Amino acid sequence: MPALGFSLFLIAVGAILAFAVNVDVSGVSLYTVGIILLIVGVVGALLSMLFWTSFAPFGHHDVHEDVHVN
């Protein structure tokens, strides 16, 4: 599912920006941008999984077979 993959990409980029990059950029806090990307990625992943489960039921399936005996 592309939405789930993109959400994981956002989470990874956000974590890298928030925790692994130590660069001073004027006017932009890379930590804040990373946290925002992490939050958006997590929300996107949760929504993607929610819609994924609503369209692909993994629960009980009813199978009806008609048996005709002559």
Image (cartoon, rainbow, N blue to C red):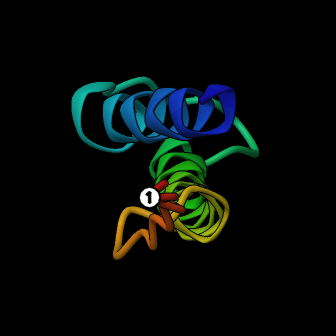
Residue 22 quadrant: top left
Query: Which is more toward the observer, 15 or 4?
Result: 4
Horizontal relation, residue 10 to residue 28: left or right: left
Query: Which is more toward the observer, 69 or 35?
Result: 69
Q: At 44% from the left edge and 35% from the top edge, which residue is drawn? A: 8
Q: At 67% from the left edge and 61% from the top edge, which residue is drawn? A: 55
Q: Residue furthest left?
A: 20
Place of residue 48 in the rendered image (x, y in percent of width and height, measured from the top left):
61, 56
Residue 51 quadrant: bottom right
Q: Quadrant of the N terminus?
A: top right
Place of residue 61 in the rendered image (x, y in percent of width and height, measured from the top left):
42, 69
Place of residue 18 in the rendered image (x, y in percent of width and height, measured from the top left):
36, 44
Q: With respect to residue 33, does 26 lie above or below?
A: above
Q: With respect to residue 21, does 28 lie above or below?
A: below
- Inspect the image, locate mark 1, and give the three-letter code of the amino acid beneath it: Val
Horizontal relation, residue 59 to residue 65: left or right: left
Horizontal relation, residue 16 to residue 40: left or right: left
Query: Which is more toward the observer, 69 or 60?
Result: 69
Q: Residue furthest right?
A: 27
- Tell me the residue that label 1 is attached to: 69
Q: Residue furthest front?
A: 70
Q: At 33% from the left edge and 40% from the top edge, which residue is drawn? A: 15
Q: At 49% from the left edge and 54% from the top edge, which residue is drawn? A: 70
Count every numbered label the image shows and give the total: 1
Horizontal relation, residue 58 to residue 27: left or right: left
Q: Residues within 10 Å of mark 1 (few under 14, many from 20)?
A: few
Query: Which is more toward the observer, 3 or 69?
Result: 69
| Mark 1 residue element | loop
